């Protein structure tokens, strides 16, 4: 049976990687796609600079460019115009192998669609993240991280044996187990009940406090209350950027 997310769960971050500097910088970034004879603009001339160890929430409706923004920062996509830098590395000009190296050792993802390996158990999925990132004691790291999200009792279950919320927690644990200094999360609480969602947000906040740069995409405005900074997107443009109205709230005050 799945257990609650542990209140004492410790952040998993590789201090040597975080110390190298994990700023995220976008200068004049646009991303356009061709669909038949139509050009679709997902992002238009975006300038964005995020300091290391920040907890940033990116708000916006579907189609506003939120996921495209994460994909550009995480080297899953390449800008049509402008420059993207992560930890000082120019992602836009990077080769395919350099972008793959960035995804292994610098940036971790929590995908909205989970992207778990169906033939691996929950523990093996989490250990995969630690192995790819080159973490020492990957097995132990995976076990402790999975326990931290309340799934120690589901370690030997395959994804099809887990609920949507449990799969989401495995995906979050896999990203955390890498210890990478940048964490990109696309709707990380979308499949979770309120209690578990709040606990996961608390865990992500602790990651930022330990040195990880955390960017969370969501359409849930309530989640933005716990951020250091809130960026709002609309039709591919940043329309607001600043601290939450009224200042950052403790996770315990959230409700939805």
Image: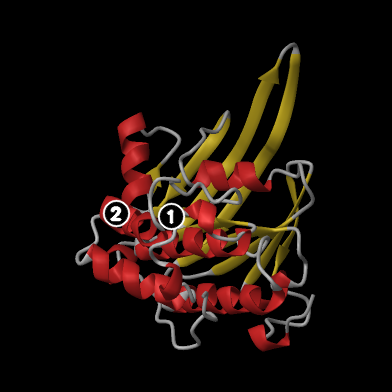
Picture residue at 43% right of the left edge, 82% below the top: 9
Instruction: Specify few, some or many for label 2: CA neighbours under 10 Å numbering under 14, 14-19, or 20 or more.
Output: many
As drawn, the residue found furthest toward the top would be: 37
Q: In which quarter of the image is residue 188?
A: bottom right
Q: Looking at the image, is 185 positioned above or below residue 80?
A: below
Q: Quadrant of residue 90?
A: top left
Left or right side of 145 for 172 = right
Picture residue at 69% right of the left edge, 71% below the top: 193
Work out whether residue 248 can be spotted: yes
Instruction: Specify few, some or many for label 1: CA neighbours under 10 Å numbering under 14, 14-19, or 20 or more.
Output: many
| Location of residue 33 in the rendering, given as x and y in whole percent from the top left corner | 66, 24
Q: Looking at the image, is 219 positioned above or below residue 34?
A: below
Q: In which quarter of the image is residue 137?
A: bottom left
Work out whether residue 16 can be spotted: no
Residue 108 is tagged as: 1
Please name whichever residue, 222 or 58, is drawn nearer the observer in this view of the structure: 222
* Kind of element beneath mark 1: strand
Residue 50 is tagged as: none
As drawn, the residue found furthest toward the left would be: 136
Q: How far apart are marks 1 and 2 (CA)?
A: 9 Å
Are the residues flagged by discs 1 and 2 in contact, CB closer than 8 Å? yes
Left or right side of 130 for 69 = right
Q: Which image quarter is the C terminus in? A: bottom right
* Kind of element beneath mark 2: loop
| Location of residue 42 in the rendering, given as x and y in whole percent from the top left corner | 70, 35
| Location of residue 15 in the rendering, given as x and y in whole percent from the top left corner | 29, 71
| Location of residue 143 in the rendering, given as x and y in whole percent from the top left corner | 33, 71
Q: Which of the two labelled residues, at mark 1 and mark 2, occupies the earlier sequence position?
A: 1
Left or right side of 145 for 109 = right
Find disc 2 in the rendering and name its residue. Answer: 133
């Amino acid at each position: 049976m799945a257990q609650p997310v542990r209140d004492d769960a410790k952040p998993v971050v590789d201090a040597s990687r975080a110390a190298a500097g994990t700023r995220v910088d976008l200068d004049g970034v646009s991303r356009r796609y061709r669909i038949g004879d139509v050009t679709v603009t997902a992002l238009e001339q975006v300038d964005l600079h995020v300091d290391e160890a920040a907890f940033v929430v990116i708000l916006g409706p579907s189609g506003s460019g939120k996921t495209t923004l994460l994909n550009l920062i995480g080297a899953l996509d390449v800008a049509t115009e402008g420059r993207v830098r992560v930890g000082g590395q120019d992602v836009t000009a990077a080769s395919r192998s350099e972008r793959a190296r960035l995804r292994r050792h610098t940036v971790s993802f929590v995908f909205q669609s989970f992207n778990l390996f169906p033939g691996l158990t929950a523990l093996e999925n989490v250990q995969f993240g630690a192995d790819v990132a080159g973490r020492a004691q990957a097995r132990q790291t995976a076990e402790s991280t999975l326990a931290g999200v309340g799934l120690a009792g589901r370690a030997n279950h395959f994804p099809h044996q887990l609920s949507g919320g449990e799969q989401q927690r495995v995906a979050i644990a896999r990203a955390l187990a890498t210890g990478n200094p940048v964490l990109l999360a696309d709707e990380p609480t979308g499949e979770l009940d309120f209690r578990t969602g709040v606990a996961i947000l608390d865990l992500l906040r602790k990651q930022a406090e330990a040195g990880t740069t955390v960017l969370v995409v969501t359409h849930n405005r309530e989640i933005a209350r716990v951020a250091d900074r809130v960026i709002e997107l609309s039709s591919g443009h940043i329309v607001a950027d600043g601290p939450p109205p009224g200042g950052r709230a403790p996770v315990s005050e959230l409700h939805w």
